[in-house]
């Protein structure tokens, strides 16, 4: 009875969560520039698109738990290691981090004083 509830309730939710994570990782990998991968010293954009694309296909169509877990690991590696490096290289810091509106890229602009 308990296993039936687990098979009917928890496992499908985990599958949907893994699929969602893989789709988001794939879209983020797709939108990043190719040269950012090289500049960050990571695998190529094609490599990550293939790995994450296979993960999406496995999660959506096959549902084999071992392959889903391998894809989950790939998605987590992308989010934890590759994406922050791509954001750092691309200059995507996510908003201003303090300073005034007269700050330039190398510090405050003092008007030639």
Image (cartoon, rainbow, N blue to C red):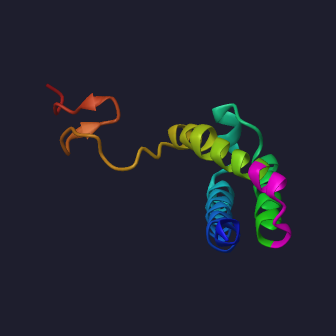
The residue located at (27%, 29%) in the rendering is 107
Q: Looking at the image, is 56 positioned above or below residue 79?
A: below
Q: Is residue 68 magenta?
A: yes
> Which residue is situated farthest in the left direction here?
113
Q: Nearer the viewer, residue 89 or 83?
A: 83
The residue located at (51%, 38%) in the rendering is 88
The answer to whether residue 48 shows anywhere in this view is: no
The answer to whether residue 3 shows anywhere in this view is: yes
Magenta segment, principal secondary structure?
helix
Residue 108 location (% of width, % of height): 22, 31
Query: Residue 10 occupies which quadrant of the picture?
Result: bottom right
Could you tell whether 9 is left or right of 51 in the image? Answer: left
Query: Residue 27 occupies which quadrant of the picture?
Result: bottom right
Query: Residue 36 occupies which quadrant of the picture?
Result: top right
The residue located at (69%, 43%) in the rendering is 35
Total labels: the figure holds: 0
Q: Is residue 51 magenta?
A: no
The residue located at (78%, 58%) in the rendering is 55
Q: Nearer the viewer, residue 36 or 27?
A: 27
The quarter in which the N terminus is drawn is bottom right
Magenta segment, which residues? 61-69
Q: Looking at the image, is 51 positioned above or below residue 60?
A: above
Residue 25 location (% of width, % of height): 64, 56
Residue 41 location (% of width, % of height): 69, 31
The quarter in which the C terminus is drawn is top left
């Amino acid at each position: 009875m308990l296993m039936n509830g687990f098979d009917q309730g928890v496992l499908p939710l985990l599958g949907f969560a893994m699929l969602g994570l893989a789709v988001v990782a794939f879209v983020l990998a797709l939108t990043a520039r190719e040269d950012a991968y090289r500049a960050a010293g990571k695998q190529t954009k094609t490599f990550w698109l293939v790995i994450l694309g296979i993960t999406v296909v496995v999660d959506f169509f096959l549902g084999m738990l071992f392959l889903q877990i391998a894809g989950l690991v790939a998605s987590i590696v992308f989010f934890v290691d590759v994406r922050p490096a791509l954001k750092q290289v691309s200059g995507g810091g996510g908003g201003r981090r303090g300073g005034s509106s007269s700050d330039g890229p190398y510090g405050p602009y003092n008007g030639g004083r």
